[in-house]
Image: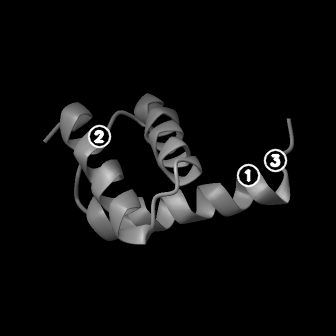
Amino acid sequence: MAQTKAEKALDKRVAAAFNATCGGIQLNIMDFDKVFAVGRAAILDGADEATLGATVRAYVETIRHN
């Protein structure tokens, strides 16, 4: 299923937040969809970039492997 431009924009923001706050953290590859779901939900709830980064990092801390 192809993503819309709006979905791509959300994912781009989530990826940027992940890259900025979670460098060096090991995750199971199957967990990335969950990280993106948490990030998208935060954006749809009105999160700014700082809040998005904090939300993504907090979630990643619960599923990290290192």
Tally the numbered discs: 3
In the image, is 55 to the left or to the right of 43? left
Residue at image location 35% in from the left, 61% down from the top: 51
Q: Residues within 10 Å of mark 1 (few under 14, many from 20)?
A: few
> Where does the N terminus fall, quadrant-wise?
top right
Picture coordinates of residue 37 (x, y %)? 52, 37
Residue sitting at x 50%, y 60%: 15
Q: Are marks 3 and 1 in contact (CB under 8 Å)?
A: yes
> Where residue 33 sits: x, y (%)?
52, 35
User: Which residue is pictured at 43% across the width and 41% down the height?
Assistant: 35
Q: Amino acid at mark 1?
A: Glu
Q: CA distance from mark 3 to mark 1?
A: 6 Å
59 versus 4 height, above or below: above
Tell me if I can see residue 26 in this picture. Answer: no
If you read the primary sequence from the N terminus, does the residue marked by circle 2 or circle 1 appear first?
1
Q: Which residue corresponds to mark 1?
A: 7
Name the residue type under label 2.
Tyr
Write down the residue under mark 2: 59
Q: Which residue is mark 3?
A: 3
The numbered mark, 2 or 3, whose residue comes first in the sequence reads: 3
Q: Nearer the viewer, mark 3 or mark 1?
A: 1
Type of amino acid under label 3: Gln
